Image: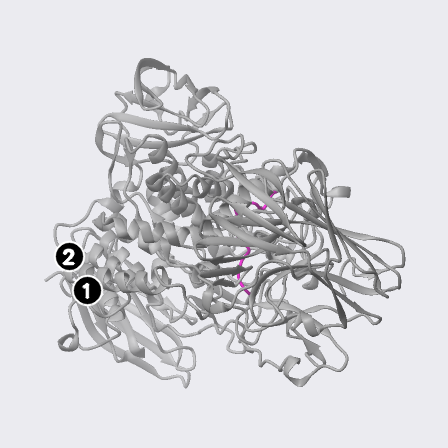
Amino acid sequence: MKRIILLTGLIAGAMTLQAAPREPQQMTATLQKDTVVVTNGKARFTFRADFRLFRTDKDPKMELRTLPDCRFFAPSWIADNLAPEKAIAQIKQSKSMGGDGIDDSVSGSVKGRTFDLFAAAPYTDLTPSKAEMAGDTIRFSYPATVWGTLECRVWAVDGSAPGMEFRFTPTREGYYSVGYLGAPSFDLGRVEALWQPMVWQRRIFPSQPYMSLAFTCPIPATLVHVGGATAGVAADSREMPFQPLPTRDNNRFGVALHNPEGKVQPMLFAPVLGHAGSKMEPGKPFAFRMRLWVEEKPLNIAFQTMARNLYDFHDYRSNAISTLNNTIDNIIDYTLSPYSNFIDSLKGCSYSTDVPGSTKNVSSLNPLSVALVADDGELYRRRAYPIVEYMLSRKNTLFCLDTTQKVQSPSRELAGPCAPVSELAGLYRLSGGKSPVLRYFAEEKYYKHKPAEKRIPGAGGNWYDALEMYRATGETAYLDHAKRQADIYIEKFIRTQPEKFQNAFFWNRYAPFYINLLELYEETGERRYLEAAHEGAREYAMFVWMVPSIPQENVTVNKGGLAPWYWYLKSRGIPRQHCPEESVPAWRFSEIGLVPESSTTCIGHRAVFMAHHAPYMLRIADLTGDGFLRDIARSAIVGRYANFPGYHINTERTTAYEKPDFPLRPHDSISVNSFHYNHQFPLLSVLYDYLVTDATNKSRGAIAFRGDYIEGYGYLQAKFYGSRPGRFYGRENVWLWMPRRLLATSDVELNYLAARGDGELLVAFTNQSARAVSAEITFNPELLPMLVGKSFTAEVWRDNRRTGEQTVTDGKTRIEVSPEGITALIVRGVDIRPRFQQQLTDRDTEGWRHDYGELEFGRARAMLLNLGRELKTCYIYLQDDDSRFRNVSMTYSIDGGRPLALNDTSYPFEFTAPVPAEARQIVIELSGVTTDGRLVRSGTFKLSKD
């Protein structure tokens, strides 16, 4: 018996920007006859040096195909003499699927193809005939075969897990693959949890021997948790280089978990049969390195430790290219520009990237929050309010006038609201309870349109909608229902390991609903919901990229002055975009910290910029001390772009989406990545949430602003800020106030959070780098004219200690901020008069009792929307379309005043009339010319306060 001693690390505590801290522990690898026993604490697993060698003369034409039991894909091969039970059955594809990132090749012919990697080609098994120790290395010898010779060694790696390398030298030309089948295997009944990227997790076992290609693996490994310990096999970091970007075309290996006997066994195969490197010539060796992993921790902790110790994941980013505030300001500018592709006549964001001729909005709460925080009335009028009407009137969030368009099943109907329960409840809450129609819509949807007498108070919708109904109404029946159902959910999906797939597409539907659980914790303060949220976030973290490791070097991108050409846009005839060639640090364009888009589009959408997980993980990290989640959160947001970056990283590394002018071009001139124009405001909400959360965490809660929940869908969940006051180093009842370009800093590493109080301007600066920052601060004289030519005293807080006072002279001052630290200024004697905020927060003392009506004429719906004393409107839309009417008119009078008229000559037929603050009644009549030329009228009806 001989032993190799290794040191590895287990993450604990808070992280630093410099590197991942490691907590040393002893790992041993012992040679016992022809096996290696790897021990780590109480965890002990036996690894054999067994391999299976596959070979075929003909190219098996490895191609991805859609799985029969999940919305995912796997490699398939053409195989001779394929047994019927090993063949792929034809899968019927949905005609409504399509759009950005959908790769039609995965739905190609399955004739003669198999998913079973063990049926793909003839093979021979190789077990060692001899094992010997030489220094810190174990060497295994194998009998020669007619196809070639194999060598294998296991060796100690300082500070990490044992390494294993095989070297195969072919004697004949052909297509080869070498599979490592020596890791411990288990009957499924013994397994507590398992993991094969991306979709086989918890106890969801692959139904047959599917392979996961390395380019789809957040960590290129498979893991199994048995008896309270975890074992696995992972590729060495050098086998997955940073450059070029990992894609299907350059993929070098794969992993699997379902072995030939149907047991759970971590396995690795290199090269992938019929793919890159598989065709070999006689005498030219192929070598591959892997790591044998053992740990006495659950899978999601093993994932973290492997990320740290094998692939050097750490808090690696800084602002570098832009403050987050400048990025936010640029994106707001962009949302109001023609390049944002907001279609005013349809009140929606163009969705032509996926569905030509369509519009799509996510939520009205996002732009409403931005308008509040940025104190921007123009944004409210031109974007936020029109989207409110869209969400209340359209049947689906995807709206298209073209009846022949079938992709993603758009609707042409005005049969709203398409807004979910949570948004309707949020709008009602925003109205201060003074717009009853919004509560009516929320309750109708929550109770699934049951008559009032058949409703059980609080019990109707799902638990996270019940939470939002409680927040909107204050009725405890909703909260009781939310807690009861959440407890059932926790027992079913967190304390129990599911064994079947959910009908999922985005990764947040594969993982537990940690965001909603955190929302429930924030509302109740009950620890079990935080613990469940933490566990769910750790599960979601296993969809986050941890590879490839980032080299400490510069990489040249955009060679020849050309940006990457995303295949989907190239296929649509979009010309290739220009971008300056440059050499920049590799970390700047790393995907680490982001997730691929979904289970069906991760082939091409390697990493999406919609990092909704970042602020939520940042909050959980602060509440639990989980440094891994903190580092993921920072990696997802910090220093990535200076304007709206589009949707994803896809085919090649580039700095194109870093540029401030990247989105400032016509839709058909962007070839780098796809633009989903409905993402602009959700991304802004995520960035605001990150700023607030970062300041709250760094101030240890001395700065705190309560945010409300925005549901959206997919990765568009976020917080709503601006409608409630907060606190700031002892000051209460202060309001976030961050108009565009409020201030400038001389150092790009400083983000800021600004608020207004009673005669005070409050600003917190958070350092995003590991170095101390000394910066000059210049306040915008157009926004703060009172500072010009005068001196003001500022109270200074540095790293949460009051350090004295300093002077702001002529709108300028200098501050010092420690590494990763926070410095705050409270400038006294500054009386800020907001331009718009107070209109959304100044509410009536009473609402309109009769604020909704349904008419027979055109099946019209009329409502009085009361979002503030000065922000009342009467909104009317017709469900009947241009198959009934040529045009429709509306005549109305307010409080008996002179009649006013509006006319709409094209579908959708809808009208908006401003209503004065003190108005008490609006009388309305509709008329229209039908398609056969008749004039018809509705008769008068009214909405009133009494």
Across and down, in percent, residue 623 comes to: 33, 41
Across and down, in percent, residue 868 comes to: 23, 50
The image quadrant that residue 814 belongs to is top left
Helix, strand or loop under label 1: loop
**Mark on residue 2?**
none
Q: Which residues are magenta?
A: 590-599
Tell me: residue 703, above or below residue 276: above
At x 72%, y 61%, the residue is: 127
Dot 2: within a 10 Å radius of its alpha carbon, few (fewer than 14), some, or many (20 or more) residues? many
The image quadrant that residue 269 belongs to is bottom right
Across and down, in percent, residue 854 comes to: 24, 74
Q: Does residue 387 appear in the picture of this structure?
A: yes
Q: What amino acid does circle 2 point to?
A: Gly
In the image, farthest residue toward the left: 946
Q: Nearer the viewer, residue 783 or 238?
A: 238
Tell me: residue 813, above or below residue 180: above
Question: Pointer 1: what residue?
Answer: 851
Helix, strand or loop under label 2: loop
Q: Does residue 330 appear in the picture of this structure?
A: no
Count of numbered badges drawn on the protein = 2
Contact (Cβ within 8 Å) of mark 1 with mark 2: yes
At x 25%, y 41%, the residue is: 838
Q: Nearer the viewer, residue 179 or 429?
A: 179
Q: What amino acid does circle 1 point to?
A: Asp
At x 22%, y 54%, the residue is: 471
